[in-house]
Image (cartoon, coloured by chain):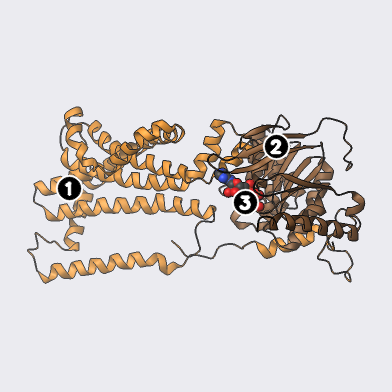
Amino acid sequence: MTTTTAPEAPSVLIENLAKAYPGGPTVLEGITTSIARGEFVCILGASGCGKSTLLNVLAQLEPPTTGAIEVPDDGAAFMFQEASLLPWLTARGNVELALRLRGVPARERRQAATELLHLVHLGEAGGKRPHQLSGGMRQRTALARALAQDRELLLMDEPFGALDAITRDLLHDELERVWKATGRTIVFVTHNVREAVRLGQRVLLLSSRPGRIVEQWQVTDSIRNDAAAAAALTRDITDRLRQEISHHA
Amino acid sequence: MPSNPTLLDDQPATGAPPSSPSATTIGDLEAGLDRLQSQGPPARRDLVRSLLPVAAVVALLCVWQILSWAGLKRSDLLPGPLTVAASLADAFADGTLQRAVATSLLRGVSGFAIAILIATPLALLLAQVRTLRAALGPLVSGLQVLPSVAWVPAAIIWFGLTDATVYFVVLMGATPSIVNGLLSGIDQIPPQYRSVGTVLGATRLQHTLLITLPAALPAYLGGLKQGWAFSWRSLMAAEIIAVGGSIGFGLGSMLQQGRDLSSMPLVMAAILAILVVGIVIELLVFSPLERRLLRRRGLLTQGAS
Ligand SMILES: Nc1ncnc2c1ncn2[C@@H]1O[C@H](COP(=O)(O)OP(=O)(O)OP(=O)(O)O)[C@@H](O)[C@H]1O
Ligand SMILES: [Mg+2]
């Protein structure tokens, strides 16, 4: 199920996409790629290179300036970079809101929310409000909410950026488990090379100003399961990223 | 890549030292982290703090009594607290006090409720339609500054000495504050919440009801609080000026009656009653609402009142 040889139509198609905010410089330019159904793609790039912008365009929160995108008809589930849980709702309430807006009938919501919270090991904390949760618990709640949307495409914008290493490793395992269990297409933005190699089947490197795809790597299962090979690939990508950044010095 | 072992489900990727058997599951590890990282129940509120205002009132009453005993002014001009209390007791005994409080409260509350019903959709509309906001925004802010007593003469000319005059003045006093409170609340909503609504697939109506209104609630409540204050003040002004006709006897009328009778104890009794009603509403309605609202969102730090 983790092979990338998907003959069917891709989940996401991006063709020659460019994006500039009104009155600002070009943020993204000439982005062309396709993402297969069920693929896990990581997008790497320096801070400010336009990773969030790319996801916002894919989520149709921002219109592309030129070029075209094709995403699943029902849109995408989104896990935001900053804390985006609604503070007036409990963890469960946040998950239930996603279910409600998806049209799940009221009596099924509670059960479904409980199952989703269990999926991210938050069964006990459903009644707590976001400010009572730790950063890791908040991100897991956000993950549960994104899963509650039940869209085929899941966009994740540096979801684990602000977490300590142990929590992050746990969430990596959970995310991988969820991905394998649900077969979703995931686009995962990070500036952490290790994270990208750990999770992605394919890693895209964006340049800065303007953001273009400068290189991409396949992370096969054999690389991922071989610590030395994974470390070597991580080093390769890091070097390339450094090169890209020092380019702007 | 030390965190890249063979990817078996339910095996911790890191954390567990190699010596310990792999008894810790992801669930255990996470439960431990969660316990460490989330906060316990809030501490109990200090009793002394809530007694402080009471002590202040008692101290003020003592100063007042001493001043009146000192006889700096004629006692009919500066009656002591005991005299005023007696006057209040008289008004209570013959039922005028209860009647006045009930009349004023009923008017104040129903006028305020009408103001909420008008102001809330108006604010939502202004927040949605940019041109309307640009056109009417300054006017609403202007009306908020205009003392609502200014409407009393106009209202008397339009509606005569009827309850409609009183309601009109209350409405003009409260509506602008409520509109502005809700508007500023909507302006302050983090754009992130809007994106959340969009991504979750909310329709326009769902956006308004499930995201915008709850997100703007703290500022809305602030506007309501101010709107109530303006309602109550406007109501008193209207009741003082517009006496007679078919207008019922409220606290403002009682105040005016005290003036007509040159009865300083009655005047001060009426002022006290007006003040006490204001404080009681604040303590029983707005303060708990606000506290609960803020605490639920984690915006109230422990110890702050
Ligand atoms: N709403 C906006 N309006 C105008 N400019 C914006 C907006 N959002 C982002 N930008 C600009 O676009 C550029 C890319 O921003 P973006 O948030 O996509 O970067 P990023 O790669 O996600 O960075 P980070 O890793 O720090 O999250 C930045 O220069 C930023 O200033
Ligand atoms: Mg970003």
Confirm whether residue A105 shows in the render: no
| Chain coloured brown in this rendering | A
Check disc 1: other Cα within 10 Å, few if <14, some if 14-19, many if 20+: many
Q: For the residue marked with disc 2, what is the amino acid?
A: Ala
Q: Are marks 2 and 1 on the same chain?
A: no
In the rendered image, the vertical position of residue B218 relative to residue A65, given as above or below: below
Badge 2: chain ID: A
The answer to whether the residues at label 2 and label 1 have Cβ atoms under 8 Å apart is: no
Badge 3: chain ID: A
Q: For the residue marked with disc 1, what is the amino acid?
A: Leu
Report the residue marked by disc 2.
Answer: A76
Report the residue marked by disc 1.
Answer: B255
- What is the total number of numbered labels drawn onto the structure image? 3
Quadrant including the N terminus of chain B: bottom right
Q: Residue at x 26, y 46 (%)?
A: B233
Percent from the top left, x then y, of residue A83?
A: 62, 51
Q: Residue at x 79, y 61 (%)?
A: B28
Front-lying residue, A20 or B49: A20
Front-lying residue, A156 or B15: A156
**Spatial distance from mark 3 to mark 1, Cα to Cα?**
56 Å
Report the residue marked by disc 3.
Answer: A82
Q: Colour of chain B?
A: orange
Mark 3 vs mark 1: give the one in front: 3
Badge 1: chain ID: B
Percent from the top left, x then y, of residue B263?
A: 11, 52
Q: Say which element carries label 2.
A: loop
Residue A114 is left or right of residue B173, and the answer is right
Name the quadrant containing residue B70.
Answer: bottom left
Mark 2 vs mark 1: give the one in front: 2
Q: For the residue marked with disc 3, what is the amino acid?
A: Glu
